[in-house]
Image (cartoon, helix red, strand yellow):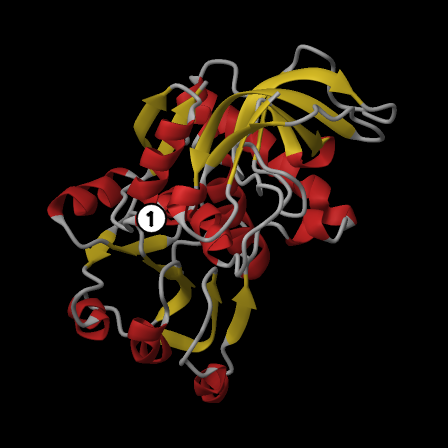
């Protein structure tokens, strides 16, 4: 079967090659890939390769397709089911014609939403869901109108769905965006207020009549905003992030007794935790939300043709760091 992978840290190392298709066992599904989307983790993984690989590494952590074969212990899917998923970092990704994936982190695909609208959403939705519901401990079933959340990089992939989920949970949402187009984007997704992360966040938030916030999501480089984060978070508030802290010191949050959490969407599957089934459940809710219109897909660019040229072009767009929403490639 056809596959695409990288052999070193450079974009130019992307190559097309042939590999044997795997047979699923246990709770695994074999999925024929019909669509993928490109995520920053793809770029970060490639850039961490320190020496030339003898075999190409297959990236890709959003997939949509049809179940071709099932393992002997599969409970929730049948051959022919349309599915979507974000994947398992410890296994080959979705840049290939067929992918083997554990059913516990897979969902039935939306019935009405298109492939491109669907495949843009799994990784970012799982990340945002775990951030909000597990790391910030937000209960969407209670009255959250007194709570305020600041989402730094609100127009990015994770920010675009986190804004929607926080709005649906009833919080007052402050999202950051740096251009008029992105300001309108996050407002359309449910942001109550918008501030520009290229300017003083403390002054902007204070000028809105808000001294401090209950929750902050760090969805871009935290270092440039660290002192703003320390200043704006309430005592006993919660800060959660998907990015590394290079120069920032967690100890700066101690005097406010701030809760701090990392989020890495792949942890559950990588360590085969029982909780990995929550990801399949989150994606089933996402499928319902996309079909009902309650959740808006954040796809903004679609490439037609599962080929080397399109993978490189799509990767370049994401790697530039200015994307609003998500980039998708359809087979």
Rendered view: 52 above or below 83: below
Residue 181 seen? yes
Furthest residue in direction top, as rendered: 80
Residue 154 horizontal/vertical position (percent)? 31, 51
Rendered view: 218 above or below 31: below
Residue 278 horizontal/vertical position (percent)? 67, 42
Instruction: Pick the residue in front: 194 or 212.
Output: 194
Q: Examine the image and state in which quarter residue 56 appears.
A: top right
Furthest residue in direction left, as rendered: 180
Q: How busy is the neighbourhood of tag 1: few (under 14 within 10 Å), some, or many (20 plus)?
A: some
| Residue sitting at x 72%, y 35% | 104
Whether residue 69 sits left or right of residue 178 in the image: it is right
Instruction: Pick the residue in front: 5 or 160.
Output: 5
Rendered view: 11 above or below 148: above
Secondary structure under tag 1 reads: helix
| Residue sitting at x 18%, y 55% | 178
Residue 309 horizontal/vertical position (percent)? 36, 29
Furthest residue in direction bottom, as rendered: 255
Rendered view: 66 above or below 289: above
| Residue sitting at x 51%, y 36% | 122
| Residue sitting at x 65%, y 31% | 106
Assign the N terminus to one quadrant of the image.
top right
Residue 249 horizontal/vertical position (percent)? 45, 83
Return the residue at label 1.
319
Residue 142 seen? no
Whether residue 26 sits left or right of residue 201 in the image: it is right
**How many numbered marks appear?**
1
């Amino acid at each position: 079967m056809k596959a695409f992978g990288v052999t070193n840290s450079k974009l130019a190392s992307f190559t097309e090659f042939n590999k044997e298709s795997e047979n699923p066992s246990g709770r695994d599904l074999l999925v024929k890939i019909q669509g993928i989307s490109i995520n920053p983790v793809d770029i970060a993984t490639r850039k961490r390769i320190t020496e030339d690989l003898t075999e190409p590494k297959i990236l890709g952590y959003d997939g949509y397709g049809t179940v071709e074969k099932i393992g002997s212990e599969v409970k929730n899917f049948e051959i022919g089911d349309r599915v979507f998923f974000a994947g398992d970092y410890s296994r080959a990704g979705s840049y290939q014609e067929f992918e083997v994936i554990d059913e516990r982190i897979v969902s039935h695909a939306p019935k009405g939403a298109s492939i491109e609208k669907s495949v843009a959403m799994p990784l970012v939705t799982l990340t945002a869901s775990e951030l909000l519901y597990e790391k910030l401990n937000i209960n969407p079933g209670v009255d959250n109108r007194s709570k305020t959340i600041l989402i730094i990089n609100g127009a990015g992939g994770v920010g675009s769905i986190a804004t929607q989920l926080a709005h649906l949970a009833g919080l007052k949402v402050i999202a950051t965006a740096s251009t008029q187009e992105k300001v309108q984007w996050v407002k359309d997704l449910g942001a109550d207020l918008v501030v520009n992360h290229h300017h003083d966040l403390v002054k902007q938030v204070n000028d809105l009549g808000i001294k401090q916030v209950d929750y902050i999501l760090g969805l871009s480089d935290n270092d440039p905003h660290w002192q703003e984060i320390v200043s704006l978070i309430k005592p006993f508030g919660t800060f959660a992030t998907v990015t590394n802290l290079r120069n920032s010191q967690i100890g700066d949050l101690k005097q406010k007794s701030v809760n701090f959490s990392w989020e890495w969407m792949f942890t559950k599957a990588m360590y085969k935790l029982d909780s990995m089934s929550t990801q399949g459940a989150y994606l089933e809710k996402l499928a319902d939300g996309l079909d009902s219109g309650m959740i808006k897909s954040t796809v903004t660019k679609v490439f037609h043709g599962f080929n080397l040229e399109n993978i490189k072009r799509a990767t370049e767009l994401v790697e530039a760091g200015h994307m609003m929403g998500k980039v998708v490639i359809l087979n």
